[in-house]
Amino acid sequence: MAIRVMLVDDQVLLRTGFRMVLAAQPDMEVVAEAGDGAEAIGILRATAVDVVLMDVRMPRLDGVEATRRICAQPDAPKVLILTTFDLDEYAFSGLKAGASGFMLKDVPPAELLAAIRSVHSGDAVVAPSTTRRLLDRFSSMLPSGTSEPQHKGIAKLTEREREVMLLVAQGLSNGEIAARLVLSEATVKTHVGRILTKLSLRDRVQVVVLAYETGLVRAGGGGGTG
């Protein structure tokens, strides 16, 4: 079945461009469009969507608050934040709100399509290195790391799961983690799944955010001592 995509942007021309790119793909279908977050939430009540491409700066209800409300719903679609500027503070807020990643609006079409497929499958963070740079840039917005993890679920992780979590937070893919720890990719994927379950997180982006919040990873990408 085709990936059902919703486009949310107050610029009609941008939505038209994205729609043309997606319409050419046999495995994707644009099923809805909205000009702001409030309209998007209303449409989602009656329309089944797999992935939402969400602008952040819109009238009435911005993309960050819309993302927060959407991701709080059961069986919510995945949300990809779209930004005009690299390292946009709004993108950071979008990740905190539950988005599965973010892309620049001028991203090459092939990268946008790959991002949609990745987020839909749940297997990868969109541009993890860029996500890491974003969090490094806005690390001052996070609480200072302490020697004791502030999230009680982290104590439930095994030593190996904690290792994997740190590498995920540093922007490594499953393949890179497998090579680093001398494991199979399937084993790494299993560990990531268990981490998400134990910490009640939606996806790998949320692992990155939590690792920064608790001080397991510091600005600059280094692992914490606790």
Image (spheres, rainbow, N blue to C red):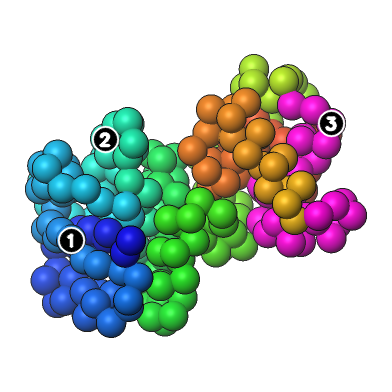
Crowding near pointer 3: few (<14 within 10 Å), some, many (20+)? few
Instruction: Name the residue at 84% across, 60% down.
Output: 179
Q: Is disc 1 in contact with disc 2, using a CB cutoff of under 8 Å? A: no
Instruction: Tell us which disc is closer to us: 1 or 2.
Output: 1
Q: Could one spot residue 202 in this view of the protein?
A: yes
Highlighted magenta segment, given as a residue range: 157-184
Residue carrying label 1: 31
Structural crowding at the residue carrying mark 2, measured as other residues with C-alpha within 10 Å and reported as few (<14), some (14–19) or many (≥20): some
Q: Residue 149 lies in what quarter of the image?
A: top right
From the viewer's perspective, is residue 142 above or below residue 174?
above
Q: In the figure, residue 103 lies in which quadrant?
A: bottom left
Instruction: Name the residue rendered at 22%, 80% in the picture.
Output: 20
Residues 87 and 14: in front is 14
Q: Are the residues flagged by discs 3 and 2 in contact, CB closer than 8 Å?
A: no
Residue occupying the point 40% across, 72% down: 112
Q: CA distance from mark 1 to mark 2?
A: 20 Å
Q: Position of residue 43 (x, y in %)?
A: 11, 47
Q: Is residue 30 left or right of residue 34?
A: right
Q: Quadrant of the C terminus?
A: top right
Tag shown at residue 69 = 2
Q: Secondary structure at mark 1?
A: strand
| Three-letter amino acid code at the position of disc 2 | Arg
